[in-house]
Amino acid sequence: MPKAFLVLDDGRIFEGKSWAAQGITFGEAVFATGMTGYQETLTDPSYHKQVVIMTAPHIGNTGVNLADNESSKIWVAGFAVRNPSTIVSNWRSEGSLEDELIAQGIVCIQGVDTRAITRHLRKRGAMRVGIFSGQELSREEMVIEVRKSGAMSGAFLVADVSTPKTYIVKAKGEKKLTVVALDLGIKSATPRSLAERGVEVHVMPYNSTVEDILAAKPDGVFISNGPGDPSTMDFVVEIVRQLLESRMPIFGICFGHQILGRALGFSTYKLQFGHRGINQPVMDRTTKKVEITAHNHGFALTAPLEGVFTTVYGHGEVTHVSLNDNVIEGLQLLDAPAFSVQYHPEAGAGPHDAAYLFDRFIELMEKNPVNH
């Protein structure tokens, strides 16, 4: 196997071996802490333009299968693992992870100490990175190329991942409600989770207008997860403000949480290294329960942590906080039907502590019927 190098923009270089596709790729260096669910991570559109470093040392054991894909393709810019599995052992497997990465041209590196890389990123912060696999460049040349690549701050990436046209996911069983989901990089598990609860979901492009949304006669609007910097999303923020004025029930997750926060007048900021992976503890202040949750975000909201805040749409409060670093993980309006969380209640491959939030959204829509 040819040599491969993971090169950070601060000049740190980790040497390993080529794995999957060879070539050169660039992105933001992020680490994910899941011991399972690597396929869901790879196919999550929120990881667009990111090189994912897996902290779990052994990746690929269970292969891949079509059912676990969160979208139609692998979105990560690159993938770094310590020990890729040489065999696949799972009754649901339809192929090996390496074969799928090769088929989709994903440049990867193996044999690097991914936990050492993670410790470096925790200390120095998320940064640009390149993987150079089977390429003959000097160390100085590789660092220069990485520093020429684009940064995540200020990146507008939603247009790359959003659906080009509306599609409908039918309710399972009796249809109870209709929801428009603004696709900013939605995972397939989200409309599936709503459909299982009797909701018909109209998944619409990110640049849909209020008129487009209302034409579907929804009982509520869902704002999805997605990649990039929330400060670039002025168009969608304005759409959400118009929906808030009409008292449309709204539920946002991840990127959608940040957009709802911006619509309420709050700002966002870049986290030092973000929250990605599973087993992230979050306190639901409305129930006092601690949820073990799945995250994928590098930005967060600035809002008052304590007490009630005031917006042009009425009063609100922070409902969820991270128990690791006190980052705001959820908020709700008290005088309008809108709430959001920073994490993933639909999380595959788990955990599922937060699945109740879809039921909370349905209850919100039932209590606040929309006049069309």
Image (cartoon, rainbow, N blue to C red):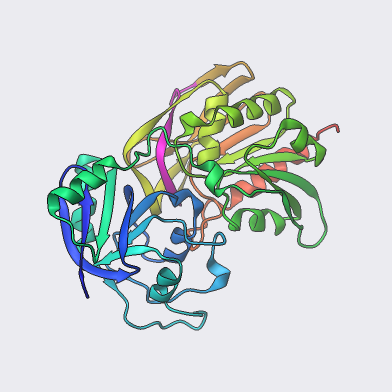
In this rendering, the answer to whether 232 lies above or below 205 is above
Q: Where, quadrant-wise, is the C terminus in this rendering?
A: top right
Residue at screen point 51% across, 40% down = 255
Residue 57 seen by the camera: yes
Please state if 318 lies on the left or on the right of 146 as rendered.
Answer: right
Residue at screen point 35% across, 55% down = 52
Corner quadrant of residue 268: top left
Residue situated in front as seen by the camera: 333 or 153: 153
Residue at screen point 54% across, 32% down = 259
Which is the main secondary structure of the residues drawn in magenta?
A: strand
Q: Where, quadrant-wise, is the N terminus in this rendering?
A: bottom left
Residue 81 seen by the camera: no
Residue at screen point 70% across, 48% down = 165
**Residue 303 among those drawn in magenta:** yes
- Residue that lies at the very extreme toward the right in this rendered image: 372
- Locate residue 95, reporting x and y percent: 47, 79
- Residue that lies at the very extreme toward the front in this rendered image: 136
- Locate residue 264, reporting x and y percent: 56, 23
- Locate residue 296, reporting x and y percent: 43, 48
**Residue 275 among those drawn in magenta:** no
Q: Which residues are magenta?
A: 293-307
